[in-house]
Image (tube, rainbow, N blue to C red):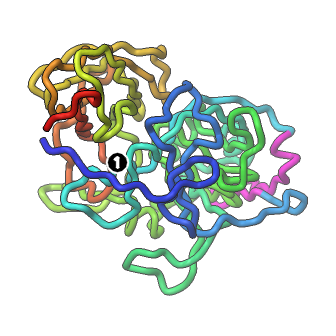
Amino acid sequence: MSSVGIERDHSSPAGLIIRQKEPTNLEMPFDQLGSYLTPTELFYIRSHFQAPQIDTSNYRLRIDGAVTRPLALSYEELRKMPSETRIATLECAGNGRVFLVPQVRGAQWELGAVGNAEWRGVPLRALLERAGLEDAACEVVFEGADHGVPAEEPKPPLPISYARSLSCAKALQPEVLIAYEMNGRDLSRDHGFPVRAIVPGHYGMASVKWLTRIQAVRQPFQGYWQTSDYGYWDFLDGKPVRRPLTEMKLKSAIARPSVYETLLPDRMYTVFGAAWAGETVAAEIAVSTDGGKTWAEAQFLDPAHRYAWRRWKFDWPTPKEPGRYTLLARAKDADGAAQPDEHDWNYGTYVISHLLPIEVIVEDLACPET
């Protein structure tokens, strides 16, 4: 199992790694992982178009389509409704793309297009109940105020808004929020101000930012980001069929040491990382320091909470012998399922949830090899 070469782009003023300037796509340097809640200024930013400027004085959130009582709520009306908080991990579906070999198209995310935050808002279920969701509805479509022409082929003939759908079964679960606060403060513009969806357990593209419309539909939504992009190949009766990406896969990632970091020999080093899952929890974590030949149990630092990551650590006595060593982390979920060894190419350039090698150099810098 080979490691990967990583070349970092420039950093933003907040210290985020710039993957694309326009639209804004930034990731957290994953070696800065520390607190359970990711500080807002370090939380990754994934945008498909330029962030819109929205004036809350004339903002309206429409809930319509297959409902009996369509609504148009102002920002103030939404904030006056009973609210709840959720701690949820969001991950870009392309997080870790730089580890794919051969290199593929798309933003070359390392490991930091993921974050864990506290979100406050109104449960989507309460809004759908107030609007009178019809029994015939099968999905709800989230539509954002951002719009444009997608960069990837096949391109639609006209500019479109960013939109994704969610099954009614998931939409009616209590964890799904229409959020206006992140980590105790109003959403920032880049994180979806004034209102965004938060869909715990699903990849980040489901949590639509700058939300302006929630439309209940009676037929499955076939929009661009539901089919052309953010989809994968499944098989039905032996034939390939296209399906939308939804639930996050079980994953663990090493934050420290970073790729090609130099460590001193014969010292105790604390390997540090995080593990997360979709509709389940990471229940076990193990670390290998010899490329997967042997494994040892690591220690979780956080209790198991559905939809939130768990940080972990592993105390490693570094080898006395200088050289290159490949570190791996592997999580198991509550059902005993483990991360796969290799990437499933039916997911294309998404769902990079296999074991990710972190190659380090053990060397005594005071006595370099000659």
Residue underneath mark 1: 96
> Residue 160's image quarter?
bottom right
Direction right: furthest residue: 57
| Of the pair 27 and 155, the residue shown nearer to us | 27
Question: Can residue 178 be seen?
Answer: yes
- Residue 66 lies in the magenta-colored region: yes
Is residue 329 positioned above or below 237 on the image?
Answer: above
Residue at the image position 31 percent from the left and 24 percent from the top: 333
- Residue 138 seen by the camera: no
User: Depth check: 146 or 111 in front?
Assistant: 111
Q: Quadrant of the C terminus?
A: top left
The question of residue 34 being in magenta is answered with no
Left or right, residue 37 beside residue 100? right
Q: Secondary structure at mark 1?
A: loop
Q: Position of residue 45 (x, y in %)?
A: 56, 52
Does residue 332 sit above or below 242 in this rendering?
Answer: above
> Is 146 left or right of 334, judged from the image as shown?
right
Say which residue appears at 45% left-offset and 17% top-offset.
Answer: 304
Locate the N terminus by quadrant.
top left
Left or right relative to 181: residue 360 = left
Residue pushed farthest left?
293
Horizontal arrangement in the rendering, residue 255 relative to residue 204 (left or right): left
Question: Residue lying furthest bottom in this view?
Answer: 157
Q: Residues within 10 Å of mark 1 (few under 14, many from 20)?
A: many
255 above or below 60?
above
Position in image of residue 138 (x %, y %): 50, 52
Q: Residue at x 61, y 50 (%)?
A: 134
Q: For the magenta stretch, what is the residue range?
A: 61-79
- The kind of residue on which mark 1 rests is Gly
